[in-house]
Amino acid sequence: MKQGQCIFDLMGAHELTAEQLEEMARHIVYEMRMWQWTYDALARMDREAPSNDSDQGWRNSLIESYLLHQRALTEFFCPRNNPRAGDVFATQYFPSWDAGSEGDELLASIPSLNKRVGHLTLSRIQNETRKVDESSWLQGHVPMMELLKRFEEMFGEKERRWFNPRLSA
């Protein structure tokens, strides 16, 4: 298996009780809602074009939030080798879950995302990340939308109750 590919044989991943799955669903819904909310806010802001440094500061903070929620959802939908203890994955809800090529595309963006958000590294000043297209934060949006849609299509009555947006954490 090539590096960056989704790992679905999670040896050592813990089994969750129905109560844990239900409680975690609220937190997953929170990540989904915040990811979508920050995207919508950025789209509105981009239509209006930031007019001053304060607006640019707000835009940057929204981009960072969007990317952090995207990373959390990517790791939920498409686990990598060596999951951390306590991590929760889509396969714990649906053992047949497969993130496919969208998951691989999202996973491939994680190293660059990690270097730009949440870590102070030299790669911020090196050519490959320094001259980043203004809309590069969008590169994972379409694959993530596809994963969200496919995940929701797997819901039965119980999961629809658990993943009710009104109950998010």
Image: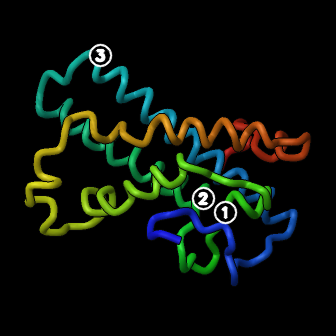
Asked which secondary structure carries label 3, the reply is helix
Residue denoted by label 2: 76
Q: Please name the amino acid that badge 3 sits on.
A: Arg
Work out how far the residue at label 3 is from the one at label 2, CA to CA, in angstroms: 31 Å
| Residue at x 79%, y 65% (from the top left corner) | 20
| Residue at x 53%, y 71% (from the top left corner) | 1
Asked which secondary structure carries label 2, the reply is helix
Please identify, in this view, whether the residue under mark 3 or under mark 1 is nearer the observer.
1
Residue 75 sits in quarter: bottom right
Residue denoted by label 1: 89
Q: Residues within 10 Å of mark 2 (few under 14, many from 20)?
A: some
Relative placement, left or right, of 11 versus 119 is right
Pointer 3 with pointer 2, Cβ within 8 A: no
Q: In this orientation, which residue lies closer to the viewer: 83 or 108? A: 108
Q: Please name the amino acid that badge 1 sits on.
A: Phe
Does label 3 or label 1 sit earlier along the sequence?
3
Q: Residues within 10 Å of mark 1 (few under 14, many from 20)?
A: many
Does label 1 or label 2 sit earlier along the sequence?
2
| Residue at x 74%, y 78% (from the top left corner) | 14
Q: In this orientation, which residue lies closer to the viewer: 91 or 55? A: 91
Q: Position of residue 100 (x, y in %)?
A: 60, 51
Q: Please name the amino acid that badge 2 sits on.
A: Phe
Pointer 1 with pointer 2, Cβ within 8 A: yes
Relative placement, left or right, of 16 versus 52 is right
Residue denoted by label 3: 47
Q: Count the labels in the image.
A: 3
Work out how far the residue at label 3 is from the one at label 1, CA to CA, in angstroms: 35 Å
